[in-house]
Image: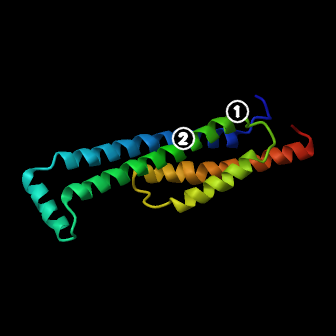
Amino acid sequence: METNKNMLLRVGSILMAVCALVAILVSAVNIFLSLGSIGNMSASEWAMLEDQFSQLGVSAEQAMGIFSTISYIALVLVVIFNVMKIIVGIVGFRKAETASTYFIAWGIVLLIFGLLSLGNLLNIIGICNLLGGIAAPILFILGGIQNKNRKSYGTE
């Protein structure tokens, strides 16, 4: 077994990429199911919704259009951010033996975003945020420090 392979970085990279992929899939399914349920509302449900929105001076069609637009924008943002995490995880896996600031820098940035997005831990997205947004960046930081120490002590 080779000693220069940093398992913290490898595990962190895999965890980050897998959790990001799951977050994309679950978010897409949730948004499409939510928007699909709006399209399948009965006439009485639509009339009740129309009545509630008319009190606000907005038609139900306008409100659903705004809701759909916001949902799609949110999905695009989720996909962009998580694709970035997948790329960081893949590059991190390939660079796991190198002593660079890549891991510490990305670890800190993604840990900050992970802490900001920490919310409900009782669903799949919350668990993905915990593992891919906090645990993986912490492994990146610790593994990056290990690689820096290896290089400074000449054991690489």
- Between 64 and 91, which is closer to the camera in this rendering? 64
Q: Note whether 36 is above or below 95 in the view shown.
A: below
- Between 77 and 61, which is closer to the camera in this rendering? 61
Question: Type of residue at label 2?
Answer: Val
Q: Within 10 angstroms of label 1, few (less than 14), some, or many (20 or more) residues?
A: few
Rendering quarter of residue 94: top right
- Residue at the extreme top of the image, as rendered: 1
Q: Note whether 17 is above or below 128 in the view shown.
A: above
Rendering quarter of residue 95: top right
| Mark 1 vs 2: CB contact within 8 A | no
Nearest to viewer (mark 1 / mark 2): 2
State the residue position of label 1. Answer: 94
Q: Earlier in the sequence, mark 1 or mark 2?
A: 2
Confirm whether residue 8 shows in the render.
yes
Give the distance between the C-alpha atoms of the residues marked 1 and 2, in whole angstroms. Answer: 17 Å
Q: Note whether 82 is above or below 120 in the view shown.
A: above
